[in-house]
Image: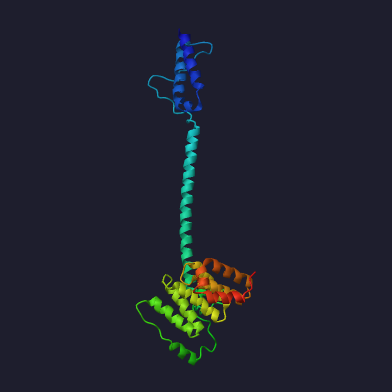
Amino acid sequence: MILRRIGLVLAIVLGFAALPAAAQDNSDLRIKKLEAEVKALQHKVFPDGAGKYFTPEITPGSAPSDDLPPPSTGPVTDILARLDAVEAALARMTATSEENTNRAGKLEARVAALESANAAPAPAVSAPEPTAVSANTNAMTSTKPAPTDAGPAPERLAAVRAIERPVSADKGEDAYLYGYRLWDAKFYPEAQQQLKMTADKYPQHKRISYVRNLLGRAWLDDGKPGTAAQVFLQNYQADKKGDRAADSLLYLAVAMAKLKETKRACVALQEFADAYPQEATGRLATQYASVKSSVKCN
C-alpha cells in the first residue's frame, strides 16, 4: 500500500516535470515541496540500511529553504521587456525630433527676417500705352489709334473738337451718333476710337449692330481692309439677324476684294445673296451690283 502511494507521488512529480516551461515557472516551489515529502516518506518506510535512508529535508515547524533557483523568464516576459525598451527609445527619439524641429523653425524665421531686411525694392514698371490694332489682329481689341511722333496737328484737334457731341437721356445712342459724325467728317482714327469705346461700353444696346458695322467702315475707309474684314465678319457672326448684319457681309466682300482675295470675296457675295435676298434686290441693291461688277466670280 505504501509502495503504491510512493509510485503515485512519483508519477505526479514526473507529470509536473513534463509540463511546459511556462507552467514550471509557477510550480517550482510546489515540486520542491513534493520532493521533500517523498524523501520524508522514504525515511519512514526505510528507516535504515542499504543506503535507503534519506535525511528528511522538512521537519515540523521548519520553513522552506531560501536557496531556491530564481524563476525562469518565459517568452511573454521577454517580449514585455523588449516592448518597454522600444517605447523608451521611441520617447527619446520623439523628444529629440521636437527639439530639432523647434530649432529649424527659429533658424528659418531668422533667415526670412534677414532676407526681407536686405531685399531691395523692385523698380516700378509702367504699363505700355495701348496701340492701334494692325490688319493681322482683332480690331475689336483696339482702344485708340496709333500715336504719331509729332501728334495730331493743332488744326486737326480744333476740327475734331468742333464736332458736336449729342446729349440726350440715351447715352449709348449719343455715343454712336458722335462716332458717326466723326466718320462722316472723315476723322477715321477718332471715329475708330469712339466706336470701339461705344461697342465695349454698350454691348447690349439696340444700336450695337450699327456700331460694329460702322467701325468696320471706319477701318475700311482708312485703308485698313484686313482689320475691316475682321470687324465685318465678327458683326455678321455675332447676330445674323442684326440691323446691319447684311451690310457687314456685303462689305466683307468689298474688303476681301481689296485684299485680292477674290475667292473669299465671291463666297461672301454668294452668302449675301442667299441669306439676304430682299436686301440684295432692295436697300443694298446698288452696292451689291457694284461689288459684283468689280469681282469676277465663276
Drawn side of residue 258 relative to residue 72, left or right:
right
- Classify the position of the N terminus by image quarter: top left
Number of callouts = 0
At 46% across and 65% down in the image, what residue appears?
Answer: 109
At 50% across and 27% down in the image, what residue appears?
Answer: 21
- State the residue in front, 272 or 143: 272
Quarter of the rendering containing residue 293: bottom right
- Residue 251, percent from left and from top: 54, 74
- Classify the position of the C terminus by image quarter: bottom right
Q: Is residue 54 visible?
A: no
- State the residue in front, 52 or 122: 122
- Residue 36, percent from left and from top: 45, 19
Q: Is residue 99 visible?
A: yes
Position above or below: 104 against 222? above
Instruction: Pick out the residue farthest to the left.
Output: 169
Instruction: Pick out the residue farthest to the bottom.
Output: 155
At 55% across and 74% down in the image, what residue appears?
Answer: 288
- Residue 184, percent from left and from top: 48, 83
Position above or below: 243 against 163? above
- State the residue in front, 117 or 221: 221
- Residue 22, percent from left and from top: 48, 28
Position above or below: 119 against 44? below
- State the residue in front, 84 or 25: 84
Quarter of the rendering containing residue 252: bottom right
